[in-house]
Image (cartoon, rainbow, N blue to C red):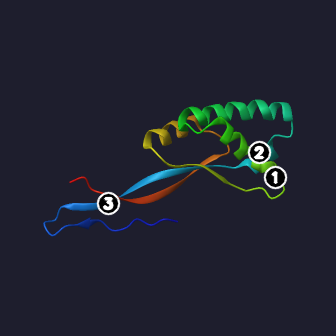
Amino acid sequence: MNAPRGLIYDAQGHLLATNVVRDDVYIEPIQFWTDHQDTVQAQADLSTLIAQLHQVLGVSEEKLQKAFNSGLATYPLATYLIARSISPDQTQALRTLRLSYVFFGATCRACLSAG
């Protein structure tokens, strides 16, 4: 878990650095394939899910397909990071879609002030 750093000010009290919280996006490929025993329906559902993620995140459909197929590997990953530090608009768009097998992990990053 990333903890926010303290705010940093100069001698005149002007903010020099702050924190920006952004979401990373993960998928659960094992759970997807566990829930989809019918391969015809699985492929249809997967195509829809991949198209939605691609539209919001801009991640290539090929990368997303590989990520979901990692759930079929001999040593599968329980979760798979597909996008790091997405914008608040992207977070809102994904939350609105309420996609199964997709979840967020908030990360805090230091940000230098422009002023």
Indicate the secondary structure of the residue bearing disc 2: helix
- Amino acid type for the residue under numbered disc 3: Thr
Which residue corresponds to mark 1?
Answer: 73
Mark before the other along the chain sequence, 1 or 3? 3
Q: Quadrant of residue 109?
A: bottom left
Residue at 67% across, 35% down: 49
Which residue corresponds to mark 3?
Answer: 18
Indicate the secondary structure of the residue bearing disc 3: strand
- Amino acid type for the residue under numbered disc 2: Asn
Marks 1 and 3, how far apart at CA:
41 Å
Q: Nearer the viewer, residue 34 or 90?
A: 90
**Given contact means CB atoms under 8 Å apart, are the residues at marks 2 and 1 in contact?**
yes
Q: Which mark is residue 69?
A: 2
Marks 3 and 2, how far apart at CA:
39 Å
Extreme-left residue of the structure: 12
Indicate the secondary structure of the residue bearing disc 1: loop
Vertical placement of residue 81 versus 14, above or below: above
